[in-house]
Image: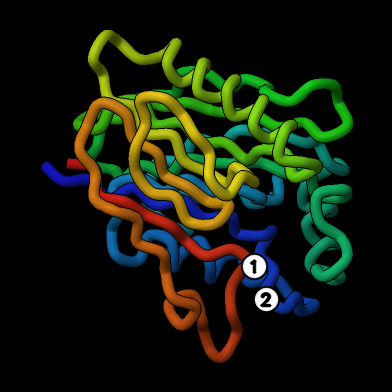
């Protein structure tokens, strides 16, 4: 059975160029509109995590990367008033893997791949029936060398969770344009990728800008990237 796997950095619900209001729910609902098997999301505010399953009807597996102000509801309200300038510093930051309800899935691990606390980056892994291990990461943007080191750690984490011969899908915003990962093939599109090991996959599909435009507003400064795993 074919499985569509998509990745999208949703930029805390910002538009491109940024506007004052949040478009996060619009972006999240768009990400599952055509029924993909799995969606890997990055740059989510913490207040949104309990709402992902409600907005999408998918099972949600979140991974917190940066703590924000508490309570989350207050932090979310403050950020939505000044969406352009206030993001992770107030409301924190997280990633999440969304899995369609008809697919069995269970969380495996969430592991920090960055060094120190200044810019905490994590990789999370979920086992999805019919696909294998799906890992989601948002790596540092400080410099390519740092991101490359974090990618190596993310690959090691994903491989440590896979059984012998089990396929691995590694997706996310890697902040590296052309990563070289032995054993992985798949989609490479700018800084966002879906890499696949142990299963055939289609070439990358990168959404054109109009596909992520709603009512004249371009959602996020990143575009969704996807592959079909066969």
Q: Quadrant of residue 199?
A: top left
* Residue 92 percent across, percent down from the top left: 78, 44
Q: Nearer the viewer, residue 84 or 139?
A: 139
Q: Is residue 87 visible?
A: yes
* Residue 76 percent across, percent down from the top left: 78, 56
In the rendered image, which quarter contains the N terminus?
top left
Element at label 1: loop
* Residue 103 percent across, percent down from the top left: 24, 37
The 10 Å Cα crowd at callout 1, few under 14, some 14 to 19, many 20 or more, is some
Label for residue 16? 2
Identify the residue at horizontal 48%, vertical 75% (top origin): 212
From the viewer's perspective, is 131 left or right of 44?
Answer: left
Identify the residue at horizontal 34%, vertical 47% (top origin): 5
Tell me if label 2 and label 1 are in contact, CB under 8 Å. yes
Element at label 2: loop
Q: Is residue 105 visible?
A: no
From the viewer's perspective, is 131 left or right of 66?
Answer: left
Identify the residue at horizontal 46%, vertical 29% (top origin): 181
In the rendered image, which quarter contains the C terminus?
top left
Q: Is residue 117 above or below residue 12?
A: above
Coloration of the structure image: rainbow
Q: Is residue 147 above or below residue 37?
A: above
Identify the residue at horizontal 58%, vertical 52% (top origin): 191
Q: CA distance from mark 2 to mark 1?
A: 5 Å
Label for residue 79? none
**N-term-proximal mark, 2 vs 1:** 2
Q: Is residue 31 above or below residue 47?
A: below
Q: Quadrant of residue 206?
A: bottom left
From the viewer's perspective, is 169 left or right of 51?
Answer: left
Residue topped by disc 1: 221
């Amino acid at each position: 059975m074919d499985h569509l796997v998509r990745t999208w950095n949703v930029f805390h619900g910002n538009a491109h160029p940024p506007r004052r209001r949040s478009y996060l729910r619009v972006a999240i609902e768009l990400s599952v509109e055509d029924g993909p098997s799995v969606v890997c999301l990055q740059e989510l505010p913490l207040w949104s995590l309990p709402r992902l399953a409600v907005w999408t009807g998918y099972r949600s597996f979140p991974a917190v990367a940066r703590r924000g102000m508490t309570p989350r509801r207050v932090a979310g309200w403050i950020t939505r008033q000044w969406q352009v300038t206030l993001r992770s510093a107030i409301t924190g930051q997280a990633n999440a893997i969304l899995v369609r309800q008809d697919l069995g899935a269970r969380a495996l691990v969430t592991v920090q791949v960055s060094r120190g606390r200044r810019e905490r980056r994590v990789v999370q892994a979920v086992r999805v029936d019919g696909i294998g291990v799906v890992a989601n990461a948002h790596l540092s943007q400080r410099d390519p060398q740092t991101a490359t080191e974090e990618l190596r750690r993310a690959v090691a984490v994903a491989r440590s969770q896979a059984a012998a011969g089990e396929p691995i899908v590694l997706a996310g915003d890697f902040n590296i344009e052309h990563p070289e990962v032995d054993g992985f093939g798949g989609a490479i599109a700018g800084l966002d990728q879906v890499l696949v090991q142990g299963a055939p996959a289609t070439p990358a599909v990168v959404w054109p800008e109009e596909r992520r435009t709603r009512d004249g507003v371009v959602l996020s400064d990143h575009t969704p990237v996807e592959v079909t795993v066969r």
